[in-house]
Image (tube, helix red, strand yellow):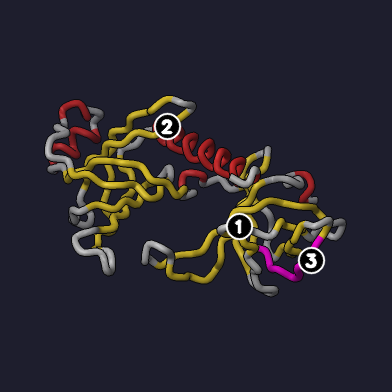
Amino acid sequence: MIEKFISPGDKLELKSTVSVVLPDGTEGVKTYRTSVYDILDDGRLELVMPMEKSKLVLLPVDGEYDVCFFAHGGMYRADVRIIGRRKINGIYVLVVEMISNLHKFQRREYYRFNCVVDMKAREMTGEESDAFARGLAHQVSEKDMARGVIVDISGGGTRFVSRQKFHENSIILMRFNLPIMEIDRPFLLAARVIHSGEIENRTNEYENRVKFEFIDTATREEIIKYILISRNNYTQVEAKGG
């Protein structure tokens, strides 16, 4: 009874299950944004065929994808297989069948949103990270912070590009702003460096992946709110052809 959770018009993202080389040179999965066209009586779904740069993306029949549905009742995930393509009333659609059960996506903090956000960061000393963990962030200096750009963010961490390499497993101080409900919300957070490596063919530029540390629930929810609002605005612009 998928109709209880998913409705025609709901936005969704299709993620390929095979890694590819992304435009920034890193390896990852390709994501396509589109929407539900219709739900058939036998439980199959018709999805509006995604577009890139005003061109239809002809996803292959028998291809399998991880789908995240953005429904009124929350976010849901399932694995699907494309079983056909067709044109209905001038709209090209993909016919897909569910190959896993639909389940509510509880771990919203790990949904990664592509963005471009200026930020600053520097490594903290052990004493500074201890102070931050005790809620004494005001005692940590923001001097000598290196500039960078956040290229994706989730409630769990970020990926950013900088001209400075950071030591893996170190704790860094991050400062950035996110526009939430038309207000620029400042964030001063600690994060653990998971990876910091030079970007191929880009001298002295480093990709850094970090996980937030000592973050409280309210702050995490603010980041998630930014992601959901920004994503909804993006899909509305797409729907209008902007």
Q: Residue 116: image x %, image y %?
A: 38, 45
Q: Distance between the residues labelled 2 and 1?
A: 28 Å
- Report the residue at 20% width, 51% height from top: 170
Mark 2 nearby-residue class (10 Å; few <14, some 14–19, many ≥20): some
Circle nearer the N terminus (3, 1): 1
Spot occupied by residue 49 in the image (x, y as percentages of width and height):
69, 60
Q: What element carries label 3?
A: strand
The residue that label 2 is drawn on is 179
Picture coordinates of residue 42, whole percent (x, y): 85, 60
Q: Which of 77 and 62 is in front in this view?
A: 62
Question: Image height check: is 179 above or below 91?
Answer: above
Disc 3 and disc 1: Cα gap in Å? Answer: 18 Å
Closer mark to the observer between disc 3 and disc 1: 1
Residue that label 3 marks:
86
Q: What stretch is highlighted in magenta?
A: 80-87
Taking the magenta stretch, the answer to whether it contains residue 86 is: yes
- Residue at position x 13%, y 35% from top? 143
Secondary structure at badge 1 equals loop
